[in-house]
Image (spheres, grey):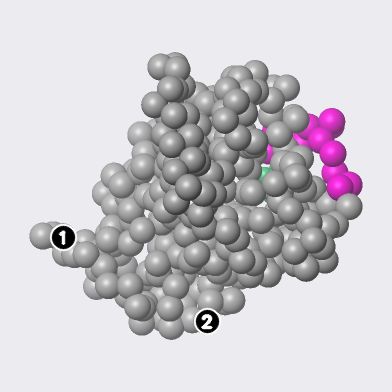
Amino acid sequence: MSYTPLVDAEGFAAFPAPAKLNLFLHIVGRRADGYHLLESIFQLVDAHDTVWLRVRDDGQIVHHNPMPNVPAETDLTVRAAKLLQTATGVSYGVDIRVDKRLPMGGGMGGGSSDAATVLLALNRLWHVNWQRQALMDLGLQLGADVPFFIFGRNALVEGIGEIMTPIETEATDFVVLHPPVHVPTPAIFGDPELTRNTPSLKVSLLEGTADWRVLRNDLESVAVRKYPQIAQHIQWLSQYAPARMTGSGSCVFAAFVAKDVEKNTSQNQANAVIFGLPKEMSGFVTSSLQEHQLLG
Ligand code: C5P
Protein backbone atom coordinates (compact mmCIF):
# COMPACT_ATOMS: atom_id res chain seq x y z
CA MET A 1 0.00 0.00 0.00
CA SER A 2 1.51 3.35 -0.96
CA TYR A 3 -0.53 4.98 1.81
CA THR A 4 1.30 4.94 5.14
CA PRO A 5 -1.20 5.08 7.98
CA LEU A 6 -0.81 7.16 11.10
CA VAL A 7 -0.69 4.86 14.14
CA ASP A 8 -2.02 6.07 17.50
CA ALA A 9 -0.68 5.33 20.99
CA GLU A 10 -2.96 2.27 21.30
CA GLY A 11 -1.68 0.79 18.04
CA PHE A 12 -4.72 1.64 15.88
CA ALA A 13 -3.82 2.59 12.29
CA ALA A 14 -5.89 5.31 10.54
CA PHE A 15 -7.45 4.80 7.11
CA PRO A 16 -9.50 7.51 5.36
CA ALA A 17 -12.89 6.51 3.96
CA PRO A 18 -13.83 9.19 1.39
CA ALA A 19 -17.38 10.14 0.42
CA LYS A 20 -18.89 10.21 -3.07
CA LEU A 21 -21.27 12.42 -4.95
CA ASN A 22 -23.41 11.15 -7.80
CA LEU A 23 -22.81 13.87 -10.41
CA PHE A 24 -25.89 12.52 -12.19
CA LEU A 25 -27.85 9.30 -11.69
CA HIS A 26 -30.14 7.67 -14.25
CA ILE A 27 -32.21 4.54 -13.84
CA VAL A 28 -31.93 2.66 -17.12
CA GLY A 29 -33.74 -0.54 -16.18
CA ARG A 30 -34.68 -2.99 -13.47
CA ARG A 31 -33.46 -6.52 -12.71
CA ALA A 32 -35.82 -9.41 -12.09
CA ASP A 33 -34.92 -9.30 -8.36
CA GLY A 34 -36.14 -5.67 -8.11
CA TYR A 35 -32.70 -4.01 -8.01
CA HIS A 36 -32.33 -1.08 -10.39
CA LEU A 37 -29.83 -0.75 -13.23
CA LEU A 38 -28.01 2.55 -12.93
CA GLU A 39 -25.95 4.83 -15.04
CA SER A 40 -24.13 7.34 -12.86
CA ILE A 41 -20.87 9.22 -12.46
CA PHE A 42 -19.54 8.51 -8.99
CA GLN A 43 -17.18 11.29 -7.91
CA LEU A 44 -14.86 10.85 -4.90
CA VAL A 45 -14.53 13.87 -2.60
CA ASP A 46 -12.11 14.60 0.23
CA ALA A 47 -14.75 14.73 2.99
CA HIS A 48 -14.18 11.44 4.83
CA ASP A 49 -14.70 9.23 7.84
CA THR A 50 -11.60 7.73 9.42
CA VAL A 51 -11.55 3.98 10.05
CA TRP A 52 -9.06 2.94 12.75
CA LEU A 53 -7.90 -0.70 12.67
CA ARG A 54 -5.66 -2.81 14.94
CA VAL A 55 -4.92 -6.41 13.99
CA ARG A 56 -5.71 -9.08 16.62
CA ASP A 57 -4.16 -12.54 16.75
CA ASP A 58 -7.17 -14.22 18.40
CA GLY A 59 -9.54 -14.02 15.41
CA GLN A 60 -12.07 -11.76 17.17
CA ILE A 61 -13.65 -8.81 15.38
CA VAL A 62 -14.44 -6.10 17.92
CA HIS A 63 -16.08 -2.73 17.21
CA HIS A 64 -15.06 -0.24 19.89
CA ASN A 65 -17.55 2.55 19.11
CA PRO A 66 -20.59 1.16 17.27
CA MET A 67 -23.50 3.53 16.62
CA PRO A 68 -26.02 3.75 19.45
CA ASN A 69 -28.90 1.33 18.72
CA VAL A 70 -26.94 -0.51 16.02
CA PRO A 71 -25.93 -4.01 17.15
CA ALA A 72 -22.23 -4.53 16.27
CA GLU A 73 -23.11 -7.58 14.09
CA THR A 74 -25.15 -5.42 11.71
CA ASP A 75 -22.50 -2.69 11.45
CA LEU A 76 -21.17 -2.66 7.90
CA THR A 77 -17.49 -2.43 8.99
CA VAL A 78 -17.88 -5.52 11.22
CA ARG A 79 -19.72 -7.37 8.45
CA ALA A 80 -16.94 -6.43 5.99
CA ALA A 81 -14.22 -7.79 8.29
CA LYS A 82 -16.21 -11.02 8.96
CA LEU A 83 -16.87 -11.50 5.25
CA LEU A 84 -13.15 -11.24 4.39
CA GLN A 85 -12.18 -13.43 7.33
CA THR A 86 -14.64 -16.16 6.26
CA ALA A 87 -13.80 -15.90 2.56
CA THR A 88 -10.05 -16.19 3.15
CA GLY A 89 -9.91 -18.36 6.27
CA VAL A 90 -7.33 -16.09 7.95
CA SER A 91 -6.89 -16.59 11.68
CA TYR A 92 -6.42 -12.88 12.39
CA GLY A 93 -9.08 -10.64 13.88
CA VAL A 94 -9.31 -6.87 14.18
CA ASP A 95 -10.26 -4.06 16.54
CA ILE A 96 -12.31 -1.38 14.75
CA ARG A 97 -13.06 2.22 15.64
CA VAL A 98 -14.71 4.72 13.28
CA ASP A 99 -14.55 8.51 13.47
CA LYS A 100 -17.84 9.38 11.78
CA ARG A 101 -17.78 12.72 9.98
CA LEU A 102 -19.91 12.00 6.93
CA PRO A 103 -23.67 12.50 7.00
CA MET A 104 -25.50 9.24 7.65
CA GLY A 105 -28.31 8.39 5.26
CA GLY A 106 -27.14 11.34 3.19
CA GLY A 107 -26.47 9.69 -0.19
CA MET A 108 -22.71 10.25 0.14
CA GLY A 109 -21.91 6.56 0.66
CA GLY A 110 -20.33 6.97 4.11
CA GLY A 111 -21.28 3.52 5.45
CA SER A 112 -20.34 1.84 2.16
CA SER A 113 -16.99 3.67 2.08
CA ASP A 114 -16.21 2.63 5.67
CA ALA A 115 -16.88 -1.01 4.70
CA ALA A 116 -14.82 -0.74 1.49
CA THR A 117 -11.95 0.83 3.45
CA VAL A 118 -12.03 -2.09 5.92
CA LEU A 119 -11.75 -4.55 3.01
CA LEU A 120 -8.93 -2.59 1.31
CA ALA A 121 -6.96 -2.12 4.53
CA LEU A 122 -7.41 -5.66 5.89
CA ASN A 123 -6.44 -7.07 2.51
CA ARG A 124 -2.96 -5.73 3.35
CA LEU A 125 -2.92 -5.88 7.17
CA TRP A 126 -4.03 -9.55 7.11
CA HIS A 127 -1.63 -10.34 4.21
CA VAL A 128 -4.54 -11.53 2.07
CA ASN A 129 -3.31 -9.76 -1.09
CA TRP A 130 -6.44 -10.37 -3.15
CA GLN A 131 -6.82 -8.60 -6.48
CA ARG A 132 -9.05 -5.52 -6.46
CA GLN A 133 -11.76 -7.17 -8.58
CA ALA A 134 -12.08 -10.06 -6.10
CA LEU A 135 -12.52 -7.53 -3.26
CA MET A 136 -15.11 -5.66 -5.33
CA ASP A 137 -17.07 -8.89 -5.91
CA LEU A 138 -16.97 -9.58 -2.16
CA GLY A 139 -17.93 -5.97 -1.33
CA LEU A 140 -21.05 -6.17 -3.51
CA GLN A 141 -22.48 -8.57 -0.90
CA LEU A 142 -22.44 -5.66 1.57
CA GLY A 143 -24.18 -3.09 -0.64
CA ALA A 144 -24.43 -1.75 -4.18
CA ASP A 145 -22.16 1.27 -3.46
CA VAL A 146 -19.31 -0.73 -1.91
CA PRO A 147 -17.56 -1.92 -5.14
CA PHE A 148 -17.07 1.69 -6.30
CA PHE A 149 -15.12 2.63 -3.17
CA ILE A 150 -12.90 -0.44 -3.63
CA PHE A 151 -12.39 0.48 -7.29
CA GLY A 152 -11.26 3.80 -5.83
CA ARG A 153 -11.38 6.03 -8.93
CA ASN A 154 -14.01 8.31 -10.38
CA ALA A 155 -16.12 6.16 -12.64
CA LEU A 156 -19.11 5.80 -14.86
CA VAL A 157 -20.95 3.16 -12.86
CA GLU A 158 -23.45 0.70 -14.31
CA GLY A 159 -25.28 -2.47 -13.33
CA ILE A 160 -26.59 -2.12 -9.79
CA GLY A 161 -23.28 -0.45 -8.90
CA GLU A 162 -20.71 -3.09 -9.78
CA ILE A 163 -19.64 -2.21 -13.34
CA MET A 164 -16.99 0.52 -13.52
CA THR A 165 -15.51 2.50 -16.37
CA PRO A 166 -12.90 4.98 -15.13
CA ILE A 167 -13.75 8.53 -16.17
CA GLU A 168 -11.83 11.82 -15.95
CA THR A 169 -13.70 14.49 -14.04
CA GLU A 170 -12.77 18.12 -13.65
CA ALA A 171 -11.08 19.27 -10.42
CA THR A 172 -13.93 20.96 -8.61
CA ASP A 173 -15.00 22.24 -5.23
CA PHE A 174 -18.49 21.32 -4.08
CA VAL A 175 -20.83 22.93 -1.61
CA VAL A 176 -22.84 20.17 0.07
CA LEU A 177 -25.97 20.85 2.11
CA HIS A 178 -27.45 18.22 4.44
CA PRO A 179 -31.22 18.51 4.87
CA PRO A 180 -32.17 17.10 8.29
CA VAL A 181 -34.19 14.14 7.01
CA HIS A 182 -33.36 10.46 6.94
CA VAL A 183 -34.25 9.06 3.51
CA PRO A 184 -34.96 5.31 3.41
CA THR A 185 -33.28 4.23 0.14
CA PRO A 186 -35.63 1.27 -0.59
CA ALA A 187 -38.69 3.58 -0.39
CA ILE A 188 -37.21 5.92 -3.03
CA PHE A 189 -36.20 3.09 -5.37
CA GLY A 190 -39.55 1.37 -4.79
CA ASP A 191 -41.77 4.41 -5.51
CA PRO A 192 -44.27 3.69 -8.32
CA GLU A 193 -43.66 7.12 -9.86
CA LEU A 194 -39.91 6.61 -10.28
CA THR A 195 -38.71 6.95 -13.89
CA ARG A 196 -37.08 3.61 -14.68
CA ASN A 197 -36.33 3.78 -18.40
CA THR A 198 -33.99 6.69 -19.03
CA PRO A 199 -32.07 5.90 -22.26
CA SER A 200 -28.38 5.03 -21.87
CA LEU A 201 -25.94 7.89 -22.51
CA LYS A 202 -22.83 5.78 -21.94
CA VAL A 203 -21.31 6.28 -25.39
CA SER A 204 -21.73 10.07 -25.42
CA LEU A 205 -20.54 10.36 -21.82
CA LEU A 206 -17.36 8.42 -22.59
CA GLU A 207 -16.80 10.35 -25.81
CA GLY A 208 -17.28 13.59 -23.88
CA THR A 209 -20.22 14.78 -25.97
CA ALA A 210 -22.68 14.57 -23.08
CA ASP A 211 -22.11 16.76 -20.02
CA TRP A 212 -23.27 15.54 -16.60
CA ARG A 213 -24.24 19.12 -15.69
CA VAL A 214 -27.25 19.03 -17.97
CA LEU A 215 -28.37 15.58 -16.77
CA ARG A 216 -30.35 14.80 -13.61
CA ASN A 217 -30.73 12.44 -10.69
CA ASP A 218 -33.80 10.31 -11.45
CA LEU A 219 -34.27 9.68 -7.71
CA GLU A 220 -34.57 13.40 -6.97
CA SER A 221 -38.16 14.02 -8.11
CA VAL A 222 -39.41 11.18 -5.88
CA ALA A 223 -37.31 12.31 -2.90
CA VAL A 224 -38.35 15.98 -3.10
CA ARG A 225 -42.02 14.99 -3.29
CA LYS A 226 -41.69 12.91 -0.13
CA TYR A 227 -39.35 15.33 1.66
CA PRO A 228 -40.05 19.03 0.96
CA GLN A 229 -36.94 19.99 2.98
CA ILE A 230 -34.79 18.52 0.21
CA ALA A 231 -36.59 20.75 -2.30
CA GLN A 232 -36.02 23.79 -0.06
CA HIS A 233 -32.28 23.08 0.14
CA ILE A 234 -32.00 22.60 -3.64
CA GLN A 235 -33.89 25.82 -4.18
CA TRP A 236 -31.66 27.77 -1.80
CA LEU A 237 -28.41 26.43 -3.31
CA SER A 238 -29.71 27.00 -6.85
CA GLN A 239 -29.47 30.76 -6.26
CA TYR A 240 -25.70 30.31 -6.67
CA ALA A 241 -25.16 27.34 -9.02
CA PRO A 242 -27.12 24.41 -10.44
CA ALA A 243 -27.88 22.17 -7.45
CA ARG A 244 -28.76 18.49 -7.37
CA MET A 245 -29.30 15.60 -4.95
CA THR A 246 -26.71 12.81 -4.52
CA GLY A 247 -27.75 9.12 -4.38
CA SER A 248 -31.18 8.68 -2.84
CA GLY A 249 -30.62 11.82 -0.75
CA SER A 250 -30.83 13.65 1.45
CA CYS A 251 -27.65 15.66 0.65
CA VAL A 252 -27.66 18.15 -2.21
CA PHE A 253 -24.64 19.74 -3.85
CA ALA A 254 -23.44 22.31 -6.36
CA ALA A 255 -20.08 22.38 -8.15
CA PHE A 256 -17.68 25.30 -8.19
CA VAL A 257 -14.97 24.69 -10.81
CA ALA A 258 -11.49 24.97 -9.28
CA LYS A 259 -9.95 26.62 -12.34
CA ASP A 260 -12.38 29.49 -11.81
CA VAL A 261 -10.97 29.95 -8.32
CA GLU A 262 -7.93 31.62 -9.94
CA LYS A 263 -10.31 34.12 -11.43
CA ASN A 264 -11.44 34.63 -7.86
CA THR A 265 -15.07 34.08 -8.66
CA SER A 266 -16.34 30.63 -7.83
CA GLN A 267 -14.47 30.20 -4.55
CA ASN A 268 -15.92 33.48 -3.36
CA GLN A 269 -19.26 32.22 -4.48
CA ALA A 270 -18.76 28.96 -2.53
CA ASN A 271 -17.83 30.96 0.55
CA ALA A 272 -20.82 33.22 0.05
CA VAL A 273 -23.05 30.14 -0.10
CA ILE A 274 -21.69 28.73 3.13
CA PHE A 275 -21.32 31.99 5.05
CA GLY A 276 -24.78 33.07 3.99
CA LEU A 277 -26.32 29.75 4.99
CA PRO A 278 -29.54 30.22 6.99
CA LYS A 279 -29.04 28.89 10.51
CA GLU A 280 -31.58 26.10 10.08
CA MET A 281 -29.44 24.64 7.27
CA SER A 282 -26.10 22.86 7.58
CA GLY A 283 -23.47 22.41 4.94
CA PHE A 284 -19.78 22.17 4.10
CA VAL A 285 -17.32 22.62 1.24
CA THR A 286 -15.42 19.61 -0.10
CA SER A 287 -13.05 19.07 -3.04
CA SER A 288 -12.97 16.45 -5.74
CA LEU A 289 -10.45 13.60 -5.36
CA GLN A 290 -8.93 11.65 -8.23
CA GLU A 291 -8.53 8.43 -6.26
CA HIS A 292 -8.96 6.72 -2.90
CA GLN A 293 -5.75 7.15 -0.89
CA LEU A 294 -5.54 3.42 -0.23
CA LEU A 295 -5.30 2.67 -3.95
CA GLY A 296 -1.96 1.15 -4.84
O1 C5P B 1 -27.41 -2.31 -1.84
P1 C5P B 1 -27.96 -1.36 -0.84
O2 C5P B 1 -28.15 -2.00 0.51
O3 C5P B 1 -27.21 -0.10 -0.75
O4 C5P B 1 -29.39 -0.97 -1.36
C1 C5P B 1 -30.44 -0.54 -0.54
C2 C5P B 1 -31.76 -0.70 -1.26
O5 C5P B 1 -31.82 0.21 -2.37
C3 C5P B 1 -31.98 -2.05 -1.88
O6 C5P B 1 -32.59 -2.92 -0.98
C4 C5P B 1 -32.90 -1.75 -3.05
O7 C5P B 1 -34.22 -1.62 -2.59
C5 C5P B 1 -32.45 -0.37 -3.48
N1 C5P B 1 -31.49 -0.38 -4.61
C6 C5P B 1 -31.96 -0.65 -5.90
N2 C5P B 1 -31.09 -0.64 -6.94
C7 C5P B 1 -29.79 -0.34 -6.76
C8 C5P B 1 -29.30 -0.05 -5.47
C9 C5P B 1 -30.17 -0.08 -4.41
O8 C5P B 1 -33.15 -0.91 -6.09
N3 C5P B 1 -28.96 -0.33 -7.81
Magenta-drawn segment? 185-198
Q: Can residue 2 be found in the magenta stretch? A: no
Outermost residue on the left side: it is: 9
x and y percentages locating residue 211 in the rendered image: 74, 53
> Predominant secondary structure in magenta?
loop
Q: In this view, does 76 lie above or below 293?
A: above
Q: Can residue 186 be found in the magenta stretch? A: yes
Residue matched to label 2: 131
Query: In which image quadrant can residue 268 be found?
Result: top left
**3D distance between C-alphas at marks 1 and 2:** 29 Å
Quick check: 211 left or right of 118?
right
Q: What residue type is labelled 2?
A: Gln
Decide: few, some or many residues near mark 1? Use Cα within 10 Å; few <14, some 14-19, many ≥20.
few
Decide: few, some or many residues near mark 2? Use Cα within 10 Å; few <14, some 14-19, many ≥20.
few
x and y percentages locating residue 256 in the rendered image: 53, 44
Whether residue 138 is visible, yes or no, is no
Outermost residue on the front side: it is: 263
Query: In which image quadrant can residue 245 be found?
Result: top right
- Residue at 84%, 39% (x, y): give it: 195
- Residue at 62%, 48% (x, y): give it: 22
**Front-most of residues 147 and 208:** 208
Identify the image quadrant of the C terminus: bottom left
x and y percentages locating residue 284 in the rendered image: 42, 36
Identify the image quadrant of the N terminus: bottom left
Residue matched to label 1: 8
Say which label, 1 or 2, has the lower sequence index.
Answer: 1
